Image (cartoon, rainbow, N blue to C red):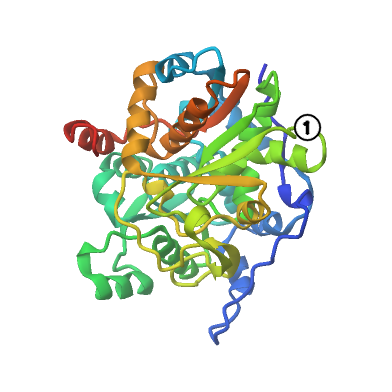
Amino acid sequence: MARLPTRWYNIAADLPEPLPPMIDPLDDEGSRIARLVEILPSRLIELEYTLDKYIDIPGEVLDAYMKIGRPTPLARAKGFEKALGVGGGVKIFYKFEGVLPTGSHKINTAIPQAYYARLDGASEVVTETGAGQWGLAASTAASMFALKTTVFMTASSYRSKAGRRRLMEVLGATVYSSPSSVTENGRKALAEMGESHPGSLGLAIAEAVEYTLSSPDRRYLPGSVMEAVLILQTVIGLEVLSQLRDEPDYMIACVGGGSNFAGFTYPAIGAWLRGEGFEKTRFIAAESTASPKLTGGRYMYDGLDAGTVLPLAKMYSLGKDHVPPPLHSAGLRYHAAAPSLSLLRKLGIVEAVALGESEVLRHAMLFARSEGIIPAPESAHAIAAAAMVARREAGNGGVTIVFNLSGHGLLDVDAYTRFVEGGGDG
């Protein structure tokens, strides 16, 4: 029986070495760290720096979690096992976050962030979004706490993900295509590349933060990467620990900035770090070949956003100015991975694999036709990675794989239409 956790988990308390701190760029434009108090909800800043292992979830947030349907189910993918031809020898399970009202895991952190913004007296929250899952979650949470919402949506997704954009507007959000003419960062990008600029999450973050700083009544809600966001996603993994009958051989999740992967795996990784189990479990991060920071990036201090409006963090990064091509898995286009995930990768505790879009969508189709669930293209990276491991382990027997199905793809018709009409080549 799944239990709704009453505390979040913070892996910083169990890491074998301290997380490198955020630093300011070496320029004369003032301290970005000092300005965080003007940007983020104050409680979020406390969470970013805390070493407390567990953080109590406020009562209003617990009520909201129950209202949206937590805990979410953990199901066995028997149809997918059969479709892969590994039935019997390999068991595959998935945690399904797509049952939540906004269709993805993003609402788990949007709710407490909006709650904390309201505690600070803010009247408006501001954020960025790629595929629209985070923007929709932030808009939903803001409406739950009577806050206005402004969203900067990467230009390629603004055009291709019109469904999620419209739903944000239904919830009362103002949605700008990024780069936009609303901010200096946006105007600079438009001047360099024109209206054909596809946008990037790093640039959209820079626009959202710049817009936030233009009024004291606004607070910026980060969708991923920051350690506070990762902490607030651990409700997923804590539920999984109460749902698993046995410790799995593999835990797999996709990675954009890292909140989905961290939320799903960190409670188990923490148990392993403390010597309390999961010694045999391998933790695999599945990323896109279009933005392969964990498999092709460099471990270095880099900007959290393209405009370095925020401080620098030590991460695996492709460079803050990385502009990937438009792709269906827009939520995985971020240039870097969260500091704690990057450290775990550097230490060899987390493995990583990069997957191409055609391979991912082929497995998404196979999963849809064998399990009856259409996955989000981002989540399908975890499906493809799970399939790869399952085929490799098919002859060994007694192997259990658990992956996070972080969202459904019912609003990703554009991705599946192109794939089906293209004869399966995307």
Whether residue 92 can be seen here: yes
Question: Which of 388/61 is in front?
Answer: 388
Q: In this view, does 405 lie above or below 373?
A: below
Question: Which of 42/196 is in front?
Answer: 196
* Residue 398 percent location from the top left of the image: 63, 18
Residue found at x 58% / y 60%: 40
Question: Which of 120/378 is in front?
Answer: 378
Horizontal arrangement in the rendering, residue 285 relative to residue 412 (left or right): right
Q: In this view, does 211 lie above or below 281?
A: below
Residue found at x 22% / y 69%: 194
Q: Quadrant of residue 276?
A: top right
Q: Quadrant of the C terminus?
A: top left
Which residue is disc 1 drawn over?
A: 277
User: Which residue appears farthest toward the front when viewing the image?
Assistant: 395
Q: In which quarter of the image is the N terminus?
A: top right
Q: In which quarter of the image is residue 90?
A: top right
Mark 1 residue type = Gly
Residue found at x 31% / y 48%: 327
* Residue 380 percent location from the top left of the image: 41, 34
Secondary structure of residue under mark 1: loop
* Residue 45 percent location from the top left of the image: 66, 59
Residue found at x 77% / y 43%: 273
Horizontal arrangement in the rendering, residue 316 relative to residue 139 (left or right): right
Number of numbered tags placed on the structure image: 1
Q: How crowded is mark 1: few (under 14 residues within 10 Å), some or many (20 or more)?
A: some
Horizontal arrangement in the rendering, residue 105 relative to residue 197 (left or right): right
User: Which residue appears farthest toward the bottom when viewing the image?
Assistant: 28
